[in-house]
Image (cartoon, grey):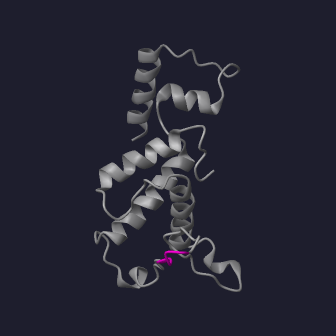
Amino acid sequence: MFSRVRKYIGAKIREKKIHVSRHNLGYRELLEGFEILSLEDRRKIALLTYLQDMLQGRITDSHLLEKINIQVARITSRMRNTFRPSTSRTNIMKFSILNRASELYNHISGKNPELDIFHINRQQFKSELTQILSLPSTSAGR
């Protein structure tokens, strides 16, 4: 695995003729030069893809499915969130997978209402997320 990554980066350096130096390029510039997403953005995509897989029936864990709180707002309501994360008196639920995925989707879809987790296929969903997260002006989920 490591050798494939090393070969890929070496090929990108030769292809793009990126002059890698410790002093002239920052982290974001290197990511843009290699045309890859940051680890944080890849984790966000994986988290939301996992949520989509559960909603579309690819993951059939009934214990997880019953904990997804889908929120249907009234017509006159200002609430536009799709999911309602669980709450508790302590922070024990704050970092659970479903709560993080729900909050992240609510945040991203609030800024990008065209993103649809229910009706598009997995590959299209991942590519739309990649586009949204790679835009520097939106800083979705950051």
Q: How many marks?
A: 0
| Point 36% across, 53% down: residue | 125
Q: x and y percent of residue 61 in the render?
A: 35, 79
In the rendered structure, the answer to whether residue 19 lies left or right of residue 36 reads right
Based on the picture, tell me whether residue 64 belongs to the magenta stretch.
no
- Comparing 62 with 129, the one in front is 129
- Comparing 76 with 70, the one in front is 76
Residue 90 placement: quadrant: bottom right
Q: Quadrant of the N terminus?
A: top left
Majority secondary structure of the magenta segment? Answer: loop
- Comparing 138 with 28, the one in front is 138
- In the rendered image, the vertical position of residue 21 relative to residue 116, given as above or below: above
| Point 63% across, 50% down: residue | 142
- In the rendered image, the vertical position of residue 131 relative to residue 13, given as above or below: below
- In the rendered image, the vertical position of residue 23 relative to residue 31, given as above or below: above
- Comparing 103 with 60, the one in front is 103
Q: x and y percent of residue 72 in the render?
A: 46, 78
- In the rendered image, the vertical position of residue 28 relative to residue 13, given as above or below: below
In the rendered structure, the answer to whether residue 16 lies left or right of residue 104 reads left
| Point 43% across, 55% down: residue | 115
Based on the picture, tell me whether residue 74 belongs to the magenta stretch.
yes
User: Quick one: which residue is furthest to the front in this view?
Assistant: 76
Range of residues picked out in magenta = 71-76
In the rendered structure, the answer to whether residue 124 lies left or right of residue 139 reads left
